[in-house]
Image (cartoon, helix red, strand yellow):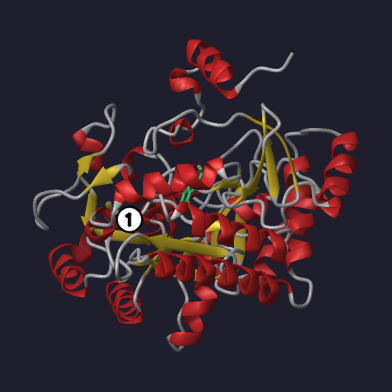
C-alpha cells in the first residue's frame, strides 16, 4: 500500500523538524502539503501518489540535462562500482578541475567542496585571508548559503552593519558584514568611501536567482568592478545558481561580453557542476588560490571533497552541456516557456513581467521587472501563491515561493512547454 503525500508529511514531521531537510521544501510560503517525490525521469518528477509533474525546479538547478540522463547514469554507476570515497586524491578530480578551468577563464585553480554553502563560506575566508581585511559586502536579497557571516539582512544605515537573519548568529559575527541594496550605484559608492580600506570582498549573485530573477545592471556591475579594482577589494561572483546554467561560461561570460576586460576575482560554483550530486567549487587566480592550505595560511578541508561518485556525475554533466548547440536549444525552450507565460497572462489581463537567460527564468506578478529586493517584495504574492497551486494541480511543478528562479532542462520537449503554457492559461483564470 502506498502512502499519500499528506501521510508522509505527517510522518516526516514526527522525526524531521518541519518534515523537511531544507526549509523551503515545506511549502510554508505557498501553503499546502509538500509533494514527496518517489522518482524522476527526463523533465518529469512523480510523487508518492504516482502523480506526474513537469519539473521546473530541477533539484533547484542541478538537473540541467533532466533526470536520469543515460550518459550521467552510466558514469555514476561505473564510479560507484570502483568505490564510494577514498579520502585520497583521484585522477577524476584533476579531470573535473581541468574541465571547469577550461570553461571559466577567470580562474587558474579551483578547489572542490560538497555544497554551495561550503564553497561560499570558503571563498569568504579566502578573500579575508588573502587581503588581510575583515569587512565584506553583500546585497539584500542575494543568498550565498547559510554560513553565519552571510546570513545577514540590511541594517538601519550604511554606517552600521547588518543584523543576523537567523537566531544563533551572534551580532559579533555579522558586525563585519555590510549589506547594500542590489543595483544601487550611489549606495555602493558611499559604502566604498566609508569602508574600502577594511573591505576584503564584495560577494554578489550576478543574476540573482534568490530574488526570482533580477539582473545586476551593466552600469552597476561596471562600477562595482572599477571600485573593487581601485581599492584592492576582491570581487566574488556567487555563480552557484548561474554557473553553467545561464551560459556555458556562467554569468561572468555574459558580463565579459558587455564590459570590456571584465572578470571576477573569485568564483563560486555548485548545483549544475555536481549534476545532482553533492559537489561545489570555488576558484580564482593562482596567487589568490595559493593562500589556501596546504600552500598557504587559509585553512579549508573536507572528508568528502572531490568525492569520486560526485565528480563522475559532474564530469559527465559538464561533457554533455558542451555539445554543440546545447545552450542555444536550452535557451530557445526557456524563451518559449516565458513568452508563453507572458502571453497567457496578457490574454487573462494579469500583469506579469518575465525574464530568462540560458536555462534559467523568472516571472513576477508585476507590471515591470523588479531591480532590487524591496521591489520583489512589492510584487503580488497572493496571486503567485494561487498560480503556484493551480499549476501544481495541473501537473506543473514550479518553485514553491516567489523568491525562486525556475529552470528548464534539456529534457523538456516542445510538447512539455506547450502543456505548461496551456496549464498557465487555465491557472491564470483562477
Ligand atoms: C543554492 C545556492 C547556494 C547554496 O548552495 P547549497 O548547495 O544549497 O549549500 C549559494 N549561493 C547561491 C547563489 C545559491 O543559489
User: Closer to the camera, 203 or 406?
Assistant: 406
293 with respect to 199 (left or right)? right
**Looking at the picture, does residue 91 appear above or below residue 31?**
below
Query: Can the viewer see residue 205 in this picture?
Result: no
| Residue in view at x 60 percent, y 37 percent | 302
Q: Which residue is mark 1?
A: 132
Q: Is mark 1 within 8 Å of ligand 1?
A: no
Please state the horizontal and vertical placement of residue 65, each as a whole percent of the image.
72, 57
Secondary structure, mark 1, is loop
53 with respect to 199 (left or right)? right
Q: Quadrant of residue 366?
A: bottom left
User: Closer to the camera, 179 or 386?
Assistant: 386
| Residue in view at x 28 percent, y 32 percent | 169
Please state the horizontal and vertical placement of residue 241, each as a whole percent of the image.
52, 56
User: Closer to the camera, 136 or 130?
Assistant: 136
| Residue in view at x 12 percent, y 58 percent | 158
- Which quarter of the rendering shows the N terminus? top right
* Crowd around label 1: few <14 · some 14–19 · many ≥20 (10 Å): few
Query: Can the viewer see residue 310 in this picture?
Result: yes
Please state the horizontal and vertical placement of residue 341, each as a whole percent of the image.
49, 65
Q: How many marks?
A: 1
- Residue furthest top as drawn: 14
Please state the horizontal and vertical placement of residue 142, each as a whole percent of the image.
35, 54
| Residue in view at x 46 percent, y 79 percent | 255
Amino acid at each position: 500500500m502506498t502512502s499519500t503525500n499528506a501521510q508522509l508529511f505527517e510522518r516526516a514531521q514526527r522525526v524531521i523538524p518541519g518534515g523537511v531537510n531544507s526549509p523551503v521544501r515545506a511549502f510554508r510560503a505557498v501553503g499546502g502539503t509538500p509533494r514527496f517525490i518517489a522518482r524522476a525521469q527526463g523533465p518529469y518528477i512523480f510523487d508518492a501518489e504516482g502523480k506526474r509533474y513537469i519539473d521546473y525546479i530541477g533539484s533547484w538547478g542541478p538537473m540541467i540535462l533532466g533526470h536520469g540522463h543515460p550518459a550521467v547514469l552510466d558514469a555514476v554507476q561505473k564510479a560507484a562500482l570502483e568505490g564510494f570515497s577514498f579520502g585520497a586524491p583521484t585522477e577524476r578530480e584533476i579531470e573535473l578541475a581541468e574541465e571547469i578551468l577550461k570553461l571559466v577563464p577567470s580562474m587558474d585553480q579551483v578547489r572542490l567542496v560538497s555544497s554551495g554553502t561550503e564553497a561560499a563560506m570558503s571563498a569568504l575566508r579566502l578573500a579575508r585571508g588573502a587581503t588581510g581585511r575583515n569587512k565584506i559586502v553583500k546585497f539584500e536579497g542575494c543568498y550565498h548559503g547559510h554560513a553565519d557571516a552571510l546570513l545577514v539582512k540590511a541594517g538601519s544605515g550604511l554606517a552600521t552593519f547588518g543584523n543576523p537573519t537567523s537566531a544563533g548568529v551572534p551580532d559579533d559575527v555579522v558586525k563585519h558584514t555590510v549589506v547594500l541594496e542590489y543595483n544601487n550605484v550611489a549606495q555602493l559608492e558611499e559604502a566604498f568611501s566609508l569602508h574600502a580600506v577594511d573591505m576584503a570582498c564584495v560577494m554578489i549573485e550576478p543574476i540573482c536567482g534568490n530574488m526570482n530573477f533580477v539582473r545586476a545592471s551593466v552600469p552597476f556591475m561596471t562600477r562595482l568592478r572599477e571600485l573593487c579594482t581601485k581599492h584592492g577589494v576582491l570581487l566574488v561572483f556567487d555563480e552557484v545558481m548561474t554557473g553553467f546554467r545561464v551560459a556555458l561560461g556562467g554569468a561572468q561570460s555574459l558580463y565579459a561580453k558587455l564590459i570590456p576586460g571584465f572578470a571576477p576575482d573569485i568564483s563560486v560554483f555548485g548545483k549544475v557542476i555536481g549534476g545532482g550530486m553533492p559537489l561545489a567549487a570555488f576558484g580564482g587566480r593562482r596567487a589568490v588560490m595559493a593562500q589556501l592550505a596546504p600552500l598557504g595560511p587559509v585553512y579549508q578541508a573536507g572528508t568528502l571533497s572531490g568525492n569520486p561518485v560526485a565528480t563522475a556525475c559532474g564530469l559527465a554533466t559538464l561533457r554533455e552541456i558542451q555539445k554543440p548547440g546545447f545552450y542555444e536549444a536550452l535557451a530557445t525552450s526557456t524563451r518559449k516557456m516565458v513568452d508563453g507565460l507572458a502571453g497567457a497572462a496578457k490574454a487573462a489581463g494579469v500583469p506579469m513581467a518575465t525574464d530568462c537567460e540560458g536555462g534559467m527564468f523568472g516571472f513576477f506578478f508585476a507590471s515591470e521587472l523588479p531591480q532590487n529586493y524591496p521591489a520583489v517584495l512589492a510584487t503580488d504574492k497572493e496571486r503567485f501563491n494561487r498560480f503556484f497551486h493551480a499549476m501544481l494541480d495541473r501537473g506543473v511543478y514550479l518553485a514553491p515561493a516567489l523568491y525562486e528562479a525556475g529552470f528548464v532542462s534539456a529534457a523538456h520537449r516542445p510538447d512539455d512547454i506547450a502543456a505548461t503554457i496551456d496549464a498557465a492559461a487555465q491557472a491564470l483564470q483562477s
